[in-house]
Image (spheres, grey):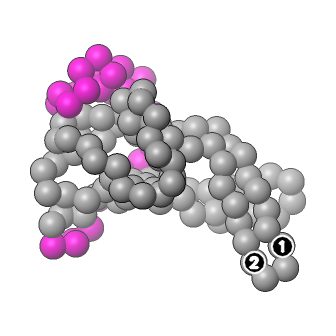
Amino acid sequence: MQGPIAKVDGEYAPNTGAAVEVNPGCHVVRSNTSDAVENPDVKISITMDAVDFAVVVQPGHHYAMERKFVDTSGSTGKFTIHIREEDAAGHVLQLIPPARVEALLKSCLEGPGADP
């Protein structure tokens, strides 16, 4: 799993964008809270709330957290975030949205590596 990840199952991840090894099963993945947007004229540092995901990791699949800024004008901005799941051949299987149901996150936290 790679991308702007701060924690997996409550444990700090390297937060470098490098891949993090995650065993199959259900895991709670939290995004980091800072990023930067650059263009030739300016670099903007951004702070945002963390976002949690409940991800059921399948053996041999690849997972990448992706954050895309859709509006960086003014003092606030908007972004989209998801985790992309690909099979071993690189085919995109799904885009996993942030968890909106606390019970799903709780079931992963109570039993990391278990199915929700």
Disc number for residue 42: 1
Q: In the structure shown, which secondary structural element does the residue marked by tag 1 occupy?
A: loop
72 or 3, which is in the foreground?
A: 3
Residue range corresponding to the magenta coloring: 89-116
Horizontal side of residue 2 vs 67, given as left or right: left
At horizontal 41% and vertical 30% (from top left) the residue drawn is 11
Looking at the picture, which amino acid does disc 1 mark?
Val
Q: Residue at x 76, y 56 (%)?
A: 45
Quarter of the C terminus within the rendering: top left
Q: Is residue 101 visible to us here?
A: no
Q: Name the residue located 17 percent from the left edge and 41 percent from the top edge.
A: 24
Quick check: 85 left or right of 60? right
Q: Within 10 angstroms of label 2, few (less than 14), some, or many (20 or more) residues?
A: few
- 7 in relation to 14, above or below: above
Q: Quadrant of residue 18?
A: bottom left
| Whole-percent x, y for residue 72 in the image | 76, 63
| Crowd class of label 1 (few under 14; some 14 to 19; many from 20; radius 10 Å) | few
Q: Residue furthest bottom?
A: 40
Which residue has dot 2 on it? 39
Q: Position of residue 13 (x, y in %)?
A: 44, 41
x, y percentage for residue 114? 17, 28
* Residue 61 visible within the image: yes
Based on the displayed image, in which of its 4 quarters is residue 36 positioned? bottom right
82 left or right, relative to 74: left
Residue drawn at the location 58% of the way across and 38% of the way down: 50
